[in-house]
């Protein structure tokens, strides 16, 4: 349920209303927009009658929320959430590009790629230390040592870093990581989501291979219900009957998610197709569809990469793409700051 307060609502009377609602067992999610101040109630609102609430002279309107997600719901928070990652904003007209290798292999590799993507205009560095792989015989990442190399590249370049977490037990290792990624295979790892909800880390939540958009937003709700509202949603392609590419990028998910939720929405075109030459086209399509950012894999030697070389751009290809993206991002009213 959403309570819309009057513009001139008396502060003391609003405090009394909030106190009464809390005494009834409701959590209150407060949102202050440019024109409206909202109180979002989380709990069993079937015990409340809108007409009774309307009798309070600080209340302008009351609306019921039918969707099962509350904190992530745009109805509860009409304006876009804007997150600040090391001085770089995402959401609300701020567009960011996250770039780097699928897996961290050596100190030289991650540092070189970090400097390359920074020179091209990316403001955040990605790199996998813990890698969930379909085959148990594939490269699984360098684990703790990989994290150390990623943080070394962060220190060398000043770029905030993004890397994937596999289990709640690893949280202590991620103290200096700026964005914790939850991969597609862990989108419904609810114990992990609950643990992340108790932190203040920004979480990049990827859509599962065969999950609906509501399921994705409900996974975000798990994190937000724990008290952590710093969530970014990522569309990375879904599994369909098409076999000519790894996954099918669901471009329609971007505007739909933007209508469902106030959270930033980014796109990973590298995993969507799994094919290098398709990445620029998919990236541009994502910008046109309203995405708040991109996550692109870049490797200094893709042919010899230990993971996902066929979908990784070279630094030269990434530099060309960034030059093409900037005017498109600005054309659609966003800034790459």
Image (cartoon, rainbow, N blue to C red):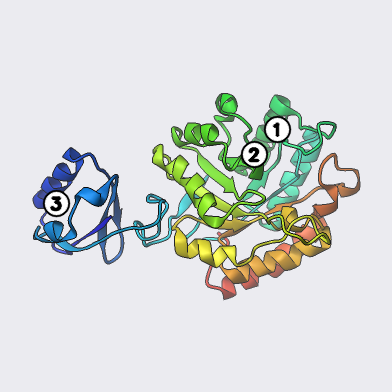
Question: Residue 59: x and y, percent?
Answer: 15, 60
Question: Residue 191: x and y, percent?
Answer: 52, 31
Q: Which residue in the protein does label 2 denote?
A: 163
* Farthest-out residue, front: 46
Q: Is residue 11 left or right of residue 222?
A: left
Quarter holding the C terminus is bottom right
Residue 290 lies in what quarter of the image? bottom right
Which label's residue is closer to the chain start, 2 or 3? 3
Q: Which residue in the protein does label 3 denote?
A: 14
Residue nearest the viewer, comparing 72 with 201: 72
Question: Residue 207: x and y, percent?
Answer: 61, 50
* Farthest-out residue, right: 303
Classify mark 3: helix, strand or loop.
helix
Please report contact status of discs 2 and 1: CB closer than 8 Å, yes or no: yes
- Residue 130's tag is 1
- Label 1 vs label 3: CA separation? 48 Å
Q: Is residue 149 above or below residue 310?
A: above
Residue 316 lies in what quarter of the image? bottom right
Q: Is residue 143 left or right of residue 215?
A: right
């Amino acid at each position: 349920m959403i309570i819309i307060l009057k513009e001139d609502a008396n502060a003391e009377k609003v405090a009394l209303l909030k106190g009464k609602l809390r005494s009834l067992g409701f959590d209150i999610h407060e949102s202050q927009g440019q024109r409206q101040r909202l109180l979002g109630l989380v709990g069993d609102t079937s015990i409340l009658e809108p007409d009774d609430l309307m009798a309070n002279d600080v209340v302008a309107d009351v609306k019921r929320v039918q969707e099962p997600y509350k904190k992530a719901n745009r109805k509860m928070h009409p304006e876009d959430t804007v997150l600040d990652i090391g001085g770089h904003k995402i959401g609300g007209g701020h567009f960011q590009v996250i770039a780097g290798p699928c897996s961290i292999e050596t100190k030289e590799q991650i540092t070189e790629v970090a400097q390359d993507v920074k020179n091209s205009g990316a403001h955040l560095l990605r790199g996998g230390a813990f890698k969930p792989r379909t085959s148990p015989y594939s490269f699984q990442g360098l684990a703790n040592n990989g994290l150390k190399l990623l943080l070394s590249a962060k220190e060398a370049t000043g770029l905030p870093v993004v890397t994937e977490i596999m289990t709640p037990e690893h949280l202590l290792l991620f103290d200096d990581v700026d964005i914790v990624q939850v991969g597609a295979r862990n989108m419904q790892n609810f114990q992990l989501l609950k643990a992340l909800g108790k932190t203040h880390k920004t979480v990049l939540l990827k859509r599962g291979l065969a999950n609906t958009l509501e399921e994705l937003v409900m996974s975000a709700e798990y994190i937000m219900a724990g008290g952590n509202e710093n969530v970014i949603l990522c569309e990375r392609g879904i599994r369909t009957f098409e076999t000519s590419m790894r996954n099918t990028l669901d471009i329609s998910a971007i505007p739909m998610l933007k209508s469902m939720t106030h959270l930033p929405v980014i796109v990973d075109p590298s995993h969507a197709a799994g094919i290098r030459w398709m990445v620029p086209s998919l990236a541009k399509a994502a910008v046109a569809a309203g995405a708040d950012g991109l996550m692109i894999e870049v490797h200094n030697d893709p042919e010899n990469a230990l993971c996902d070389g066929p979908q990784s751009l070279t630094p030269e290809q990434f530099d060309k793409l960034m030059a093409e993206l900037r005017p498109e991002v600005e054309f659609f009213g966003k800034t790459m700051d």
